[in-house]
Image (cartoon, rainbow, N blue to C red):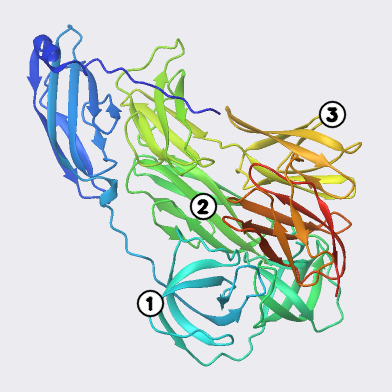
């Protein structure tokens, strides 16, 4: 979906002298500040007539058509507020006020300081990494800033306080950058044996990984040792007892563990679903009773009602303080150990109004690549296409008025439009971004998978030979080698986004559209522990390095920065001896694949 530019023509933004010449009356605008975070402002006027049309314009591009809007400014500073009121008899009144108003940039947030314990690990065997902290809950943290004076040493068991540094980039792709506020070495605890259940998953397409266990709690562990005689197989649902080992791994999916006891519960993970529903008990007082349909009996319940309240009852009753749009989440833990969540959107309104004939028209502005700066403008029309008057709009973002700003891509939003004591209308929408996807192969079978799929969206794949497939992950067998165009369309309601990509089908692997006029070198070949890459005339870019075995499985995937370098090195010491295929590509180009021999 392409970005639209809409210019809203406002009649009252005339040349000041011309406006004064036509003014029939002057209005006084007053305002009050709501002490919220960020603060908002209520604007009113001294207009005393009936059945008039209000046009508010605020200097940060906000527009309202209600008698008394509530507005939150984008930034603090001096702003101007203009008002035009047009009565049915043709008379027009104008108002204007200027002043200093606080905006969203006035929000003050303290950094969130977290507490943890863990082991200091040397992960320099992973490209671009050095020392890291492996916490007890399986996280890998990269201490890029240390406020106290403390020398980290591999093998230390530490207790520390930290905060995430979300805006810091590191070339080590294993872990999250943090700032250490407090740290001390402590005595390590005795070995702990933990019992859990989970599904065995084949993650061999990830560099350095093989079979892992994805537990019902959401944590993934890497089983490097199994004490008893047991063979893991992908797809098994197992119950096992393990201990966490103080080891680093090239696979960054989770902590390394030793399994002491393990049994297969079933060859597949048991089905686990929950669907929350509700019943209106007292609409005037906003009282609702909640239930959940589950695929298997639940032992633990967790209800989050969307207003900060919660309950552990199976069928709770809850009263909201005020009307609004609430997202209710129900999380259950079943007898088999399966944990799953379901959600619903509740529109709390009293009294219930009939549905307005017609529909809500939405004009959407895509967010930029920088983040959540999208916008939506709503208008309520009747069945004849005539816009309703005196409509009040309320968005799930908390904003009022016909415009919502600060919207993100691929996130569901809801709008409630109503005319007091007349009727109401609800609508939902999602601003879709172009879907991104990855492809892998095994023999002549190719797997296409969407990265970060949107819940509820429909993904349709179209291949150049005319065949189609539907789903977030599909497999396809091409008839012969060649360069194919693959089209992916994602739809969510009436919203659609499309992306195309070239796929090079060869006997061993796949690649983006190959550009043959770029040369590169990989040496030495044969190689032992490291290889060096020279990319010809390219001197400023990020490139992706992929290594495949002879079956087409990805064994290594690294992002390398080549800015200002004549050559870039990559660590391959974890690869066993044998023949491999190496592929290089960036966001704008790719190079022909080449063979690499690894020797002991």
Measuring from the top left, give residue 551's x and y in whole percent: 88, 56
User: Which badge, 1 or 3, is on the more N-terminal residue?
Assistant: 1
- Image height check: is 473 above or below 244? above
Q: Seen in the image, is 338 located left or right of residue 466?
A: left
Q: Nearer the viewer, mark 2 or mark 3?
A: 3
User: Which badge, 1 or 2, is on the more N-terminal residue?
Assistant: 1
* Viewer-proximal residue among 516 and 474: 516
- Image height check: is 128 above or below 424? below
Q: Evaluate whether residue 207 shows in this view.
A: no
Q: Which mark is residue 329?
A: 2
Measuring from the top left, give residue 65's x and y in whole percent: 27, 24
Please name the residue shown 34% across and 20% down the image.
8
Q: Which residue is mark 3?
A: 465
Q: SS at mark 3?
A: loop
Which quarter of the rendering shows the C terminus?
bottom right
Query: Do the CB atoms of the residues marked 2 and 3 lie less than 8 Å apart?
Result: no
Please name the residue shown 24% across and 47% down the image.
39
Please name the residue shown 13% across and 16% down the image.
93
């Amino acid at each position: 979906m392409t970005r639209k530019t809409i210019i809203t023509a406002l009649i009252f933004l005339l040349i000041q002298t011309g406006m004064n010449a036509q003014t029939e009356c002057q209005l006084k605008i007053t305002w009050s500040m709501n002490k919220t975070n960020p603060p908002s402002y209520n604007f009113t006027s001294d207009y005393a007539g009936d059945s008039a049309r209000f046009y508010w314009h605020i200097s940060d591009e906000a527009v309202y058509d209600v008698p008394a809007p509530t507005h939150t400014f984008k930034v603090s500073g001096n702003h101007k507020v203009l008002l035009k009121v047009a009565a049915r008899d043709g008379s027009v009144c104008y108002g204007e006020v200027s002043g200093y108003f606080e905006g969203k940039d006035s929000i003050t947030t303290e950094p969130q300081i977290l507490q943890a314990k863990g082991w200091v690990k040397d992960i320099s065997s992973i490209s671009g990494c050095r020392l890291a902290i492996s916490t007890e809950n399986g996280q890998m943290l990269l201490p890029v800033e240390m406020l106290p004076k403390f020398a980290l040493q591999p093998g230390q068991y530490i207790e520390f306080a930290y905060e995430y540094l979300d805006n810091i980039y590191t070339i080590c792709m294993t872990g999250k950058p943090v700032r250490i506020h407090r740290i001390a070495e402590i005595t390590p605890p005795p070995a702990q044996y933990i019992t859990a259940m989970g599904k065995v998953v084949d993650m061999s397409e990830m560099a350095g990984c093989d079979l892992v266990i994805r537990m019902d709690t959401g944590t993934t562990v890497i089983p490097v040792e199994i004490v008893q005689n047991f063979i893991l197989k992908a797809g098994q649902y197992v119950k096992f007892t393990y201990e966490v080992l103080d080891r680093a791994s090239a696979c960054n999916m989770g902590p390394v563990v030793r399994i002491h006891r393990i049994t297969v519960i079933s060859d597949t993970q048991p089905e686990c679903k929950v669907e929350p529903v509700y019943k209106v008990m007292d609409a005037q007082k906003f009282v609702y009773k909640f239930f959940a349909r589950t695929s298997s009996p639940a032992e633990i319940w967790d209800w989050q009602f969307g207003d900060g309240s919660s309950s552990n009852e199976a069928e709770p009753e809850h009263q909201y303080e005020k009307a609004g749009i609430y997202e209710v989440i129900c999380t259950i833990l079943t007898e088999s150990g399966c944990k799953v969540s379901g959600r619903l959107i509740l529109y709390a309104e009293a009294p219930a109004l009939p549905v307005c004939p017609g529909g809500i028209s939405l004009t959407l502005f895509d967010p930029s690549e920088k983040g959540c700066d999208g916008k939506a403008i709503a208008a309520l029309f009747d069945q004849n296409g005539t816009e309703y008057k005196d409509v009040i709009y309320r968005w799930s973002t908390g904003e009022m008025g016909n415009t919502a700003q600060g919207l993100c891509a691929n996130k569901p939003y809801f709008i409630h439009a109503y005319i007091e004591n007349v009727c109401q209308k609800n609508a939902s929408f999602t601003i879709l971004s172009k879907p991104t996807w990855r492809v892998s192969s095994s023999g002549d079978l190719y797997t296409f998978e969407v990265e970060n799929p949107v819940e509820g969206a429909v993904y349709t794949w179209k291949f150049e030979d005319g065949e189609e497939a539907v789903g977030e992950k599909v497999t396809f067998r091409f008839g012969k080698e060649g360069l194919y165009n693959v089209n992916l369309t994602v739809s969510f309601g009436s919203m659609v986004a499309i992306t195309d990509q070239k796929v090079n089908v060869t006997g061993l692997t796949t690649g983006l559209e190959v550009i043959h006029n770029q040369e590169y070198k990989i040496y030495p070949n044969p190689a032992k522990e490291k290889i060096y890459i020279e990319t010809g005339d390219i001197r400023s870019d990020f490139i992706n390095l992929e290594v495949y075995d002879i079956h087409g499985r990805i064994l290594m995937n690294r992002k390398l920065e080549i800015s200002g370098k004549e050559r870039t090195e990559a660590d391959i010491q974890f690869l066993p001896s044998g023949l491999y295929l190496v592929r290089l590509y960036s966001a704008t180009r790719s190079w022909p694949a080449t063979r690499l021999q690894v020797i002991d």
